[in-house]
Structures are given as structure tokens and as C-alpha cells.
Amino acid sequence: MIDPTVHLVGLRKRFGGTIALDDVDLEIGPGVTGLLGPNGAGKTTLLRIAATVLAPDAGEVRLLGYDPRVAEDRLGIRRQLGYMPQEPGFHQHFTAFEFVDYVAILKEWTERKARHDEVRRVLGLVGLDAVTHKRIRVLSGGMRRRLAIAQSLLGAPSLLLLDEPTAGLDPEQRLRFRELLGAQRAGVIVLLSTHQTDDVAALCQRVIVLLGGRVAFAGTPAELAARAKGRVWLADSRDPRAELAWVTSEGRVRHIGEPPASADLVSPTVEDGYLVLAGPAATESAVA
Amino acid sequence: MRGAGLRLVAAIAAGAAFVGLIAGSSPRLPLPLFLLVGVLGVVLFRSRTVRAIEVGWTGAPAPAPAPVVAVPPLPLGAPRGGGGSVARALARFEARQLATGACFAVGIGFWAMVYLTFGVLWVDDVDRSWSEFVGRLTMMSHPFAAAAIIAAHRNRTRSTRDGCDELFDACPADADTRTRGHLATAWVGAVVCVVGAVGMLVLVAARNSRLYGPFDREVAAELAATAVIGAGAVVLGVTLGRWARWSLTPVLAVVGIGVLGGQINQIGGQSWATDRLLSTFVPSGGIDALYYTRPVWGRTAWLLGLTVLVGVLALVGRRPRRILEATAAGAAVITIVAALVVVRPASRSDAASIAERIAQPVAHARCLPAGAGVRVCSYEEYAELATRTVAAIRPVAAAVPPSAREGVTFLTYFEKRDRQLQREVRDALAGRTRDLPGGVLRLRFHSHPDNFAASRFRLAARAVGLPTEARPGGEGTVVAGQARGVVALWLATRGMSPADTARRLRDADRSPGDPRDASDRGAIWPGGCSDEPSVLQWSPTDLRAARLLVGRPAAVVANVIRNDWDRFTDPVATTDDLLRAVGMTPLGTPERIEAREYSC
């Protein structure tokens, strides 16, 4: 039985003069956890630490019951880890199959037949069956993203860390991705960083909002949405008193903040909750 | 005991470096060797303090309880291998990547160029003994090795170049395992070099039947050294890729090896020094292989030890250290012992044996008759050279009157300067007289067709009383307008094919812009490109006369020459006298010819 948690206490990480993580305390259990936050909030840094490729300056990290400061434990973590970096590099002259096959070897799949079966399985999961033997250099950006997802699924990991996995995916592929994550076996910890609040709403049992390297929120998506309860309005024109306002596809203006004149109160979404929490700093990434 | 191996290596290396610094000026103890070993030792020693690769995760463990399970269960029943099996699986993968890479293809192309150069276009210039040729195989493998260094470096740095490091670092196989996988591709370089070298031997054997001498155990040593160079190139590329990822690093390494090798090859100056075998490429000693010692197995061990040491450098910091330390210690011992074996002076018995061969060439020769009164003697090891020379000169000997060929002996002997010999051989030769029979004709060690033609010319020149060697300054003897010069040409071409005869007696007319004057055009003594200066110089008119004589029935010319031998071998008799005697129209006064030194 594996200790099914990601346990972070007092985590700090600084890059030169920039504080990436500041006293982060988190306990993440099985299920899908979304990581929201504006650019530079520390999401990627948190994922890199959880992926054991970056060490914190201070704080305690415990992943699946292991301490990554111990070499043997680190190996234990990596054996249970699936990781998709924000900008996964590819050997462009490899075929899709070769690349995932190579990662499979690095994940200690040394028996050729079993490894190849597993590679075919994960490529099938992301719908890349038809291009397994095409060079990566000829694949589209979306296909490469799916390839990166595929390698992270090798061996059905217990800890799956995905940094912006749906960026660049078309709507159909995003739905398929949601299905894929939804089908993960019980007990798997999935931590995904994203700017897509609808992905969080559709996928995540828990959501964490990072702001300025600190945890601003940790709870369910519904709880996050509830942060905006009574503060989201639809009006026919923009009210200058609004904290945030933007034109919807129906042509009306959605306001967050105090109610404008003759406005309709509407049910908040996860995005509304996030925007209320993050304030104007979030608009650059979240609203876009 | 932990770290004892590395401490031993460091101690040995430091000692070696100290000795090198003290005695570095001596050609017997080359400074670069010891400095190299010393640097390797220092690097290994310092590696004990090198931080783990995964910087940052090396702090003290948190005082938390132990993991719930020490080894988690495998997902989906995955067959998981240990570090060794992962490295092997990676090696198979990386070997394919290495062998199909562009740089490696360039290396194969270099081998193809070597084939084209020495196996096709200029295969006749491969004209020494098999031993000499085999000794050049390691040098021939160098263009490939240079490309292999770059290819292996690019292979090892591929993940960094393509931005995959973060992803790969999150995998169980750590950087050391990946490096081991890359190091294990060294066999690809070794195989290519061995196949290239064996292919070269086969190609040359198929296209050039004139190489001679034993094909003995040195071949195995040289092939082994070639394999090690191929493997070593890959290992060096991987090691550089592990620690110095700049893309120009392998290029600088190739240049550095070239410069260092060139420096090592100059040890001893004009004298042969076995220290040169510490270089990865070894030039010829400038003298035949029979006259110097070459500890080829020691050299192979030296290269092997260096290769392993360089490979160990790629894994510095790896845990557990014990195997690495043991490997480093073993390799260091092999390297140093092999280096000492290579650079040690020639043994007294070896030096005495070589000196004996030089002082008493006849005593060590096997002689074959080439017609009444003429014999060809070569060192016993080179009996084929004598056989082929006999076949070349027999028709010439048959055409020479018996009185003019009595007691003529071709002989292989040491014809170079004593200062080119090893010091120990020179010492062994000191005070000894060279037992060289008077009047012997030099049988050179080359097997180029020109060399056999030169033997024909040499016999013919001896028969008519002309010099058989160039003057001390290298100038030839002018025989322009002399009947004996033309007789020598006629004799030298006996039994020669018409095409070869025409080629040997060719005197292309001057064309506009041709800078060659009559003296140049009359210098047709064969072998200028294989260290044989033009012994005699004819005029173009003499060559024309010789061509006319060759066109007459041989019996008619032979009768005229034999019946009036004394007259036509007298310097006073002119070319026109000879032509008139044969019943041909005189050609008139020959061109003015200057004595010059000619070489290729």
C-alpha cells in the first residue's frame, strides 16, 4: 500500500530575486487536483519540485510517502511518476513510437515486447495510433502535446503531474483528454496545472489557486465558484465600478463586484471564483 | 576501504606526474604522458567531493517516518529492469541512433575515402611490407575516429539540445545510467574500425599483389588497437558530452589530440623512439620495420587503459563507488604499466639482433639466382621481395653477356642514416664494421612497379659500366649521346611489355607552356616517387634512339651489341655510332644535358 498523498510543508523556492514559492503547505490526495494561478504564480515550480527535478530551498516534501532528498526514495518516487513538463522537448528526428519507447526504457521497461505493447497502449490512449511511425518533426503542435501526455501515462503511474496538458489541443481532443483522466484508476494522484478553468470544473475534485507563490485557495471547484456568489452580474453596459467586466458572446457585459444598475444576478462559475480571488492580476491569463 | 581505489589511482597518478615533471625533458619519459595521467588522477581524486548530479536533493532527510512501503508495486505488472538492464536497453537504442547519425555517416565516408585513396587510386603506392602497411591501420582509422567523437558527443548531448532533460530527469534511469548506455555503444565504433581495417587489408591484398613479408601476430595487435581507437573515440565523445556540452568541445578535442599526437610523434627527433607509440597515430619510423622495435601489444594496452580511464571520467560521481573505483584503479595500472612497456629502451638482445642484421646483411639474407652470375638476396623475412625481383630482372640478365654479369648481387641492407636508428641499436652498432660485399646492387624495400623497373635499370647500368647510384649530392650521371647509355636502356627493357616499354622510354615532346627542358625530359630513371633519385640522365635524342632500337628485331640488336660489346660500352662510342651499327639513320647531336637531382 502506497501512502497516497503529496505532502508539502513550508515550501520555499527562490530564483535570484524572484520568489516562486513562499511557505506553501499542501496535502494532496488521490483524484484530480487542478492548479490555477496567473503566469508566474509558481505552478510550474511546484510541479517541478513534485517531479523531483527541482529541489526546494526550504520546506519538507513527501511524495507517496517518500522523501525526495534520499536517493533511494527519489528513485521510488520516479518509478511511480508520470510527468509532462510545460515545454517538453522532443527529439525531432525520432518517430512518435521511438520517443515514447525511449522514455519507456528510462522508466525501466527493459523487456522489449512488454515495452512495445505499453508504448502502443499509451499512444492509442491519446489517439496517435495512426502516426506512431511518423517523425515528430512532421507532427502538429497538438499531436506533440498528446505525445507528451502519452509518455506521462507509461506504466499507469500513481502520481501524474501534467503542466498545461490541454494547451494547444482542439476541443475534441480536450474532451478526450478529460475522458482519459477520468478513467484513471482509483488512488492515482493527478496534479494538473492549467489556465483552463472549464477543464478544472469538468475534471478536478480539488483545486488549488496559487498567487504570488502562496496558496490562495484550496478546496473543491464548487467552493471556488462560491467565492463569487452574489458578485457576478450581467448587464447591458459596462459599469466603471466593476472590479472586472467583459463582454460575453451574447453581447451582454459580465461584471464581477458590486451590482451595476439594472443588472441580473447570475450563478458564478469556477472562473468567476478564480477571478474574484485573483483580482485584476488574473485577467491576463485567465480571462484570455 | 571506501575510496581506497581512487586514492591508489590518485597516488599513482600523482607519482607519475611528479616523475614526468622531473624527467619530462627526457625522450624516454615524455612529459605529456605523465601530465595526462596526472590530470586524470587529480580529476578522479577530486570527484570524491563532487556533488551528486541531482543538485539540491542532497540535503539531510526529513525526520519523517519511513515510507509506507519500501518498494512500491509495479503498475500493470510492468517488467522493470535494474540499472544494468536499463543501460543495456539504452545501449541498443543509442547504438542505432549513433550508427544512423549524420556525423557517424561522415565517419563512414572517411573510411570510404581511405579505401578510395589507398585501396583504389594509389594502391600501387602501398609498396612496402605487410608489417609497414598494417602499422598504418590505426592512422587510417583516425578520420573516422574524429567523426565518431563528434557523433558520440552529439548523441550524449541530444537531450539537452532538444530540451528533454527535464522530462528524462524525472525518470528512474538517472544521468549515470544514461551515460552508461551511451558508453556501451562504444562497440559500434570498434566494429566499424575493425571492419574498416580488415576490409582495407582485403582490398589492398586483392588489388596489390606485391606487398611482401610476414603477416604475423602484429596484425592482431594492430587490429585490436584499431578497435580500441574506434571504441575510444565513442567513449571520449560520450565523456565530453557528459561534462562539456558545448557543441564545439569535441572539435577542440580532436584538434587537441592531433596536436598532442603530433608532439609525441616528434619525440626522438630523427631517431626512432618507441615513445611515439603513445600517440594514437604513429608515423613510419622512416626506416624499415626490421630496423626498430615496436611493442605493439603494449601500445594496444595503453590505448585500452586510456579508453577505460576516460570512460570512468564519464561516470565520476556515480554510486556505488566501489566498482567505479576498482575499474579506475585497474585501468590506471594497465595504462601506466603499458606506457612504461612502450617507452622502455629496446632490450639488449633486440638491439643486438637488429645491429647484427644491419652489420651482416648477407648473413641474414636468402638469395635466389636470377640467371648465371646474378643473384638477388633479401632479408629472410622478405623472401617474396627477392622472388619478385628475380622475375623482373631475369630477362635483363639473360641479355647481358656473361662476362658483364658475373658476380652481380642485389641485396637488401640498411641504406639510411644511422641517426635514424634507436639509440640502443646505434649503441649496439658502435664499432662494428658493416659487412657489405663490394659491388652489391641495392635492393630497395619498395614493391612499387617502379622499384622493379629500377632494378632492371640498375642491372643494365652495372652491365655497361655505368654508376648504379646517384652521386652523393643526389645528382645523376649524364650519359647523353653515349652509346652505352642507349645500350643500358635497351637492356633494361628486355622482357618488358610493349606498353610498359613505351611508357618507360617516353619522352613527351615539349608542348607550349611545358616548363620541362631537355634535361628534365631525359631523366627517366624509375622510382623518383619512392625515394629513388635519377641515377642516369639521358637526352631526349637518346630516348628516341632507344625507342628505335626497341623497334628493331631483338636478335639483330643483341648480335650487334654482343659482338661489339667493348666498343659500345666505351664512353667514347656515341649514340649515332650504335644506330649506324644497327643499320639505322643517325639522329645527330644530342641536346645539352645538365646533371641535376631529381625526385618525385
Image (spheres, rainbow, N blue to C red):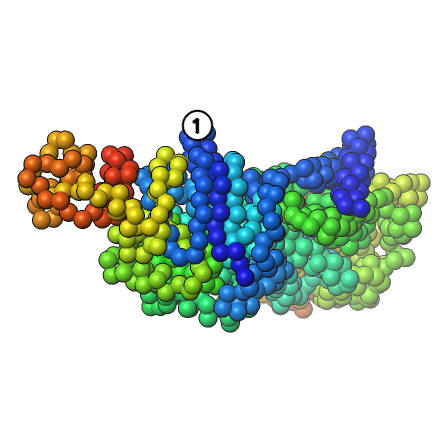
Apparent side of residue A173 relative to residue B372 in the rendered image (left or right): left
Of the 4 image quadrants, the one containing the C terminus of chain A is: top left
User: Which residue has dot 1 on it?
Assistant: A17
The single residue placed furthest to the right in the displayed view is B431
The single residue placed furthest to the top in the displayed view is A17
Chain where mark 1 sits = A
Q: Could you tell me residue B540's position as x and y percent?
A: 57, 48
Q: Which amino acid does label 1 sit on?
A: Gly
Q: Could you tell me residue B572's position as x and y percent?
A: 71, 47
Residue B4 seen from this side: yes
Q: Residue at 41% of width from left, 68% of height from top? A: A121
* Residue A277 position (above or below residue B284): above
| Element at label 1 | loop
Based on the displayed image, in which of its 4 quarters is residue B340 positioned? Answer: top right
* Residue B456 position (above or below residue A124): above
Category of crowding for the residue at label 1, using alpha-carbon neighbours closer than 10 angstroms: few (below 14), some (14–19), many (at least 20) = few
Q: Residue at 49% of width from left, 68% of height from top? A: B76
Q: Residue at 80% of width from left, 57% of height from top? A: B410
